[in-house]
Each structure stands twice: as C-alpha cells, then as structure tokens.
Image (spheres, helix red, strand yellow):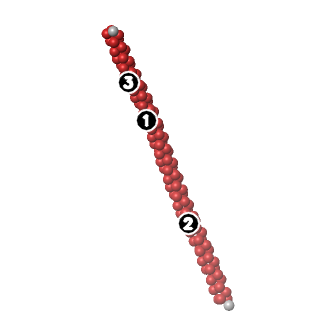
Amino acid sequence: AEKTKDELQKFISQLKNDVSQLLSDFHNTQIEMAAKTKDERLLFVNELKNDVAKMCADFNNDLTQMQAAEEEELVSEVEVEEEEELISEAEVEAEVAEENEVKSEVVNKSKRRQKRK
C-alpha cells in the first residue's frame, strides 16, 4: 500500500506538472496569437487609411479638374458671346453703311434730276 501511495503521489504530481505545462502552453499560444492578430489588424487599418486618403486625393483632383473645365467652358461661352456681339455690331454697321450708300445714291440722283430740270 505504501508503494501504491508513492506511485499515486508521483502520478498526481506528474499530472499536475503536465496540466501546468499545458496551461502555460495555452497561455503562451494565446499571447502569440493576440500579438499576431493585433499586428494584422493594425496593418489592415493602416492600409485602409492609405486607401481612403488616396481616394480622397483622387476625388479632390477630379473635382479640381471638373471645376477648371467648367470655368474654361464658361470663359469659352463668354468669348463666343462677345464674338457674336462683335459680329452683330459689324453687321449692323455694314447695314447702316449700305443704307447710307443707298441714301447717298438717291440724294445724288435727285440732285442730278434737279440740275437737269
């Protein structure tokens, strides 16, 4: 019985050591896993921040280009309107000059008729 008691105590002692070692391994593995997943999460978040920053920069560039194109279009429209106004003014001046020429011819013809009489 004494031998069996010593064997049981050794077995129980060994079992306690095994369980302690197993718990220690679990604990160390959990710490390693936590550190690894934390690093992975940080990497993911940093990549996400970089992607969002790039998207914002691209959006701002697109917006700036659209505004510049719109301003250029407005300037172009104003230039076309000014050119059309100049053409209209030139046409009016040409018409007035033509009318004056016709009037002048009529007056000259009238004067010639009066001289003949």
Residue 69, image x, y percentages: 45, 40
Q: In 3D space, how far apart are the residues under numbered discs 2 and 1 (Cα atoms)?
A: 63 Å
- Residue mark closest to the camera, 2 vs 1: 1
Task: Inspect the image, locate mark 1, and give the three-letter code of the amino acid beneath it.
Answer: Ser
Mark 1 lies on residue: 76
Residue 92, image x, y percentages: 41, 25
Task: Inspect the image, locate mark 2, and give the three-letter code of the amino acid beneath it.
Answer: Met
Mark 2 lies on residue: 33
> In the rendered image of this protein, does residue 25 appear above or below residue 104?
below
Q: In 3D space, how far apart are the residues under numbered discs 3 and 2 (Cα atoms)?
A: 90 Å
Mark 3 lies on residue: 94
Residue in the image at 51% along x and 57% along y:
43
| Residue placed most toward the observer, 76 or 28 | 76
Q: Quadrant of the C terminus?
A: top left
Q: Residue furthest bottom?
A: 1
Q: Are marks 3 and 2 in contact (CB under 8 Å)?
A: no
Q: Quadrant of the N terminus?
A: bottom right
| Residue placed most toward the observer, 67 or 30 | 67
Residue 16, image x, y percentages: 63, 77
Q: In 3D space, how far apart are the residues under numbered discs 3 and 1 (Cα atoms)?
A: 26 Å
Horizontal relation, residue 53 to residue 3: left or right: left
Residue in the image at 37% along x and 22% along y:
98
| Residue placed most toward the observer, 106 or 34 | 106
